[in-house]
Amino acid sequence: MKVLFIENYYYPYISGITESTKFLAENLAARKGFEVAVLCSNHDKLPKEEVINKVKVYRAPVIMKISKGTVSPAFITMAKKLAKEYDVVHFHLPMLEAGILSRVIDPKKIVITYHCDVNLRPSLLNNFIVKVMDASHKKALKRVDRIVFSSLDYAKHTRFCSKFIDKATEIAPLHKSVKKVNCKVKPHSIGFCGRIVEEKGIDVLLKAFEIVKKEIPDAELRIGGDYKNVAGGSIYPELIDYVKENNIKDVKFLGKIPEKDLTKFYSELGVFTLPSINSLEAFGLVQLEAMICGVPVVASDLPGVRTIVQKTKMGLIAKKKDEKDLAKKLIEVLKNRDKYVVAPKELDKIYSNDVVSNLYIGVYERSNDKTN
């Protein structure tokens, strides 16, 4: 089976979406009988074409960037041409071009993964961008028969996707191949890993950490994540200013953590937290990766994000944008850590990459049947 992924960003750009699509593409490409390619925008002067772990990557030239998006007239032309060569064309939304592409590509070939709503800081330009993106996504979703969400919980709470719930299939994203390593756990260490951007709620986490320090004086906060190469910009300077102005001790910004060091980062933590504040966070792969490394999680009560803790019982859920509740839940887990840890094999039953890939193959096969 020949599968073409179409998305605006792909590796080496790092985000929850690009990570999960990369893992899926490479898992499929490693299987006998699959040929996998990706079309994305050339967002950072990268090779026009290359092969990464058996996945052929095509990059369309970009003429400009607006907010978090890229403008590439060639993207649609390349997508239309490449789609003719593949059995399944897998769109990954958000993607501005989705509406147009659903008209120039046979919709029977198309499978859509709707990763998340678009949320931008309110402004005339950003409000316009959100409306255009939503309109494009609606057109695409109407034309296709198979839509994948990381959870039905998220699908039901998006701005408009509940209208398409009859087409929906729940499939969790794929994750890094991590496992717990033998190292000394820092029992009062709180960890976060992700892009240093507004929607991650790191400002709320810093306020919660101030409360935690009063209850657990030797607590430390370790924040990993890129703040230099972030589409739409990073809030790193504001966070650093807040830490300095409020004289918060034991906060470490680690920058982008190399992939080879991630398992050690997770495995040393007493608790991992994902304090995201809006629907740009639809699942939160990092919390699953932390759990696989034996670390309990405190996650925001957001649709989709909360489902991992709900299914695994490996942590607690905190009210979004509420530093007091977040601090309360962090303290509870830090003081009763063993209560919230489950065996990795229990997680594998639900979330192993092979389980998830097989579910996607089932969707592809149903889509492919309609084109024959």
Image: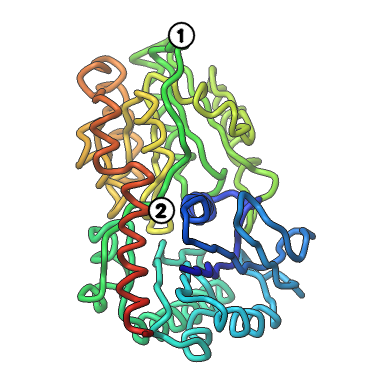
As shown in the figure, which amino acid type bears the numbered disc 1?
Answer: Lys
In depth, the one of 70 and 346 nearer the eye is: 346
Point out the residue furthest to the bottom here: 103
Which residue occupies the foreground of this view, 136 or 104? 104
Residue 106, located in which quarter of the rendered image?
A: bottom left
Tell me what residue is drawn at x 42 percent, y 12 percent.
Answer: 185
Marks 2/1 in contact by CB < 8 Å: the verdict is no
Residue sitting farthest toward the front: 32
Q: Which disc number belongs to residue 281? A: 2
Q: CA distance from mark 2 to mark 1?
A: 31 Å
Q: Residue at x 64, y 61 (%)?
A: 56
Q: Position of residue 35 (x, y in %)?
A: 54, 63
Tell whether 321 sits left or right of 18.
Answer: left
Pick whichever of labels 2 and 1 is earlier in the sequence.
1
Q: Position of residue 318 (x, y in %)?
A: 27, 39
Label 1: few (<14), some (14–19) or many (≥20) C-alpha neighbours in 10 Å: few
Which quadrant holds the C terminus? bottom left
- 30 sits to left or right of 48: left
Position above or below: 47 against 364:
above
Amino acid beneath label 2: Glu
- Asked which secondary structure carries label 2, the reply is loop
Q: Position of residue 366 (x, y in %)?
A: 30, 73
Is residue 214 rendered to the left or right of residue 240? left
Towards the viewer: 33 or 214: 33
Nearer to us in this view, 208 or 260: 260
* Residue receiving disc 1: 184
Indicate whether 169 appears above or below 264: below
For the residue labelled by badge 1, is the local secondary structure a helix, a strand or a loop? loop
Total labels drawn: 2
Relative image position of residue 207 (x, y in whole percent)? 43, 32
